[in-house]
């Protein structure tokens, strides 16, 4: 009996066909093999021009070697493609438009601004969202600076802390502001103290097309470093959302973000939260509230956008224990758990998408025969999936156009 086949779809990082996260894929393929899942990696650039075949990258856990082989399209696709400003990202969009009949474990989410707007529609989430608006000229920044708190400017499609600026009041009476951040290559830029009347010309030199302006939550530790929490929620082997883990992150010196790839440090959640919230009962209450918030958001976004299998939420917690959702990431890394020594959490973070893929296969693609009339017809299921994907693509395009119109 043939094994169910999962294709992990990613993008090459450059024209030399280098892959990001190759070590993660090795672990995923190994876990898949243990579960009875045939898994390979491919990119939209690997599709045969004339036939429905893929030039798949296959990893052998026994030899530790990668090989290339032409394979038929998989039963399911786990989309790990992250946003790029490249022709490769256009190939991804074309692939999804062309192959709408394939089964995808997860759908692309919209940009930061669109996700914020979507979450803000639900009253229960609003207290957990920092004030955010689409950048529409310097008055957007000036208006938020009047609250005398830090203001972040973020690319709506940025990842890894790239292109983020923080503007913080230094001298409220004198109108002096500290400007710091990272460039698009993730490098920390030199700090500058700028008067309000020179702030607009300074920002004009920074390309602010498709940026958001966001209220900064006070999360600087006594040593001046920022911190936050990375929460990972995933579908389990029964197709149910479950918390996989949550870890703290402390930013590098002079960094405005806590990203690990930007030099940040991973710390167990309770250890970091203890520095911030001393009362044990209060900490426990915050942790439970954060877990419920993460699961509720995952279920809500899946209902809004279509099938998802994992999400990472970046959370800020202020001195009063109020939780804020800074970002939602549909293509999360998971090494934060490895760095804090939580080996089982890290293994689970790797294995759960594989377990969920098997659940999808056995319940939606190749269900066991039933004796009653409640068995769904396979053709009906495929039509449903195809309709969902077309709707999701139309929504994504519509959202992007709105964001462009708003920033024009």
Image (tube, grey):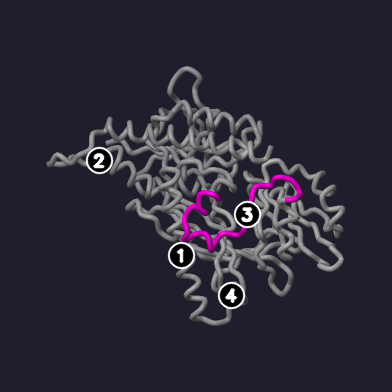
Label of residue 320 in the image = 4
- Contact flag, marks 2 and 1 (Cβ < 8 Å): no
Instruction: Identify whether 283 is placed above or below 343.
Output: below
Q: Which residue appears at 34% of the width and 45% of the height? A: 358
Residue at the disc numbered 1: 291
Which of the two labelled residues, at mark 3 and mark 2, occupies the earlier sequence position?
Answer: 3
Q: Which residue appears at 68% of the width and 50% of the height? A: 154
Which of the two labelled residues, at mark 1 and mark 3, occupies the earlier sequence position?
Answer: 3
Query: Looking at the picture, how far across and down is residue 66, in whole percent?
Result: 52, 38
Residue stretch rendered in magenta on the structure:
117-139
Disc 1 from disc 3: Cα separation: 23 Å
Residue at the disc numbered 3: 132
Residue 88 lies left or right of residue 372; in this view the side is right
Q: Secondary structure at mark 4?
A: loop
Q: Secondary structure at mark 2?
A: loop
Q: 181 or 391: which is nearer to us?
A: 391
- Contact flag, marks 4 and 3 (Cβ < 8 Å): no
**Which numbered mark, 4 or 1, is in the foreground of this view?**
4
Query: Looking at the picture, how far across and down is residue 113, in whole percent?
Result: 59, 47
Disc 2 from disc 1: Cα separation: 32 Å
Query: Looking at the picture, how far across and down is residue 316, in whole percent?
Result: 59, 64
**Which numbered mark, 3 or 2, is in the foreground of this view?**
3
* Residue 338 appearing in the image: no
The N terminus: image quadrant = top left
Which of the two labelled residues, at mark 2 and mark 1, occupies the earlier sequence position?
Answer: 1
């Amino acid at each position: 009996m043939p094994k169910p086949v999962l294709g992990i779809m990613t993008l090459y990082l450059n024209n030399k066909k280098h892959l990001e996260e190759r070590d993660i894929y090795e672990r995923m393929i190994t876990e898949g093999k243990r579960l009875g899942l045939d898994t390979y990696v491919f990119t939209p650039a690997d599709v045969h021009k004339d036939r429905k075949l893929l030039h798949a990258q296959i990893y052998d856990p026994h030899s530790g070697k990668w090989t290339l082989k032409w394979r038929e399209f998989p039963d399911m696709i786990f989309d790990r493609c992250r946003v790029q400003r490249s022709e490769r990202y256009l190939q991804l969009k074309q692939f999804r438009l062309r192959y709408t009949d394939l089964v995808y474990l997860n759908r692309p989410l919209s940009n930061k601004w669109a996700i914020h707007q979507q979450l803000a529609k639900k009253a229960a989430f609003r207290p957990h969202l920092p004030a955010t608006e689409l950048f529409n000229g310097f008055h957007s920044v000036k208006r938020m600076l009047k609250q005398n708190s830090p203001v972040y400017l973020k690319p709506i499609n940025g990842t890894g802390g790239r292109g983020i600026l923080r503007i913080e009041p230094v001298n409220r009476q004198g109108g002096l502001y500290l400007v710091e951040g990272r460039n698009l290559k993730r490098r920390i830029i030199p700090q500058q103290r700028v008067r309000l009347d020179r702030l607009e010309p300074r920002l004009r030199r920074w390309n602010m097309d498709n940026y958001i302006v966001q209220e900064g939550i006070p999360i600087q530790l006594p040593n001046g470093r920022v911190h936050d929490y990375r929460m990972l929620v995933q579908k389990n082997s029964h197709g149910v959302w479950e918390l996989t883990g949550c870890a703290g992150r402390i930013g590098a010196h002079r960094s405005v973000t806590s990203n690990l790839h930007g030099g940040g440090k991973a710390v167990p959640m309770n250890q970091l939260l203890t520095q911030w919230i001393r009362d044990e009962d209060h900490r426990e209450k915050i942790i439970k509230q954060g877990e419920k918030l993460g699961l509720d958001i995952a279920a809500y976004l899946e209902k809004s956008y279509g099938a998802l299998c994992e999400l990472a939420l970046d959370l800020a917690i202020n001195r009063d224990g109020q939780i804020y959702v800074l970002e939602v990431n549909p293509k999360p890394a998971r090494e934060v758990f490895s760095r804090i020594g939580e080996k089982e959490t890290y293994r689970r973070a790797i294995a759960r998408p594989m377990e969920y893929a098997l659940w999808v296969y056995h319940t939606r693609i190749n269900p066991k025969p039933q004796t009653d009339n409640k068995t769904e017809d396979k053709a009906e299921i495929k039509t449903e999936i195809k309709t969902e994907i077309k709707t999701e693509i139309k929504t994504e395009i519509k959202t992007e156009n709105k964001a462009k119109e708003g920033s024009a």
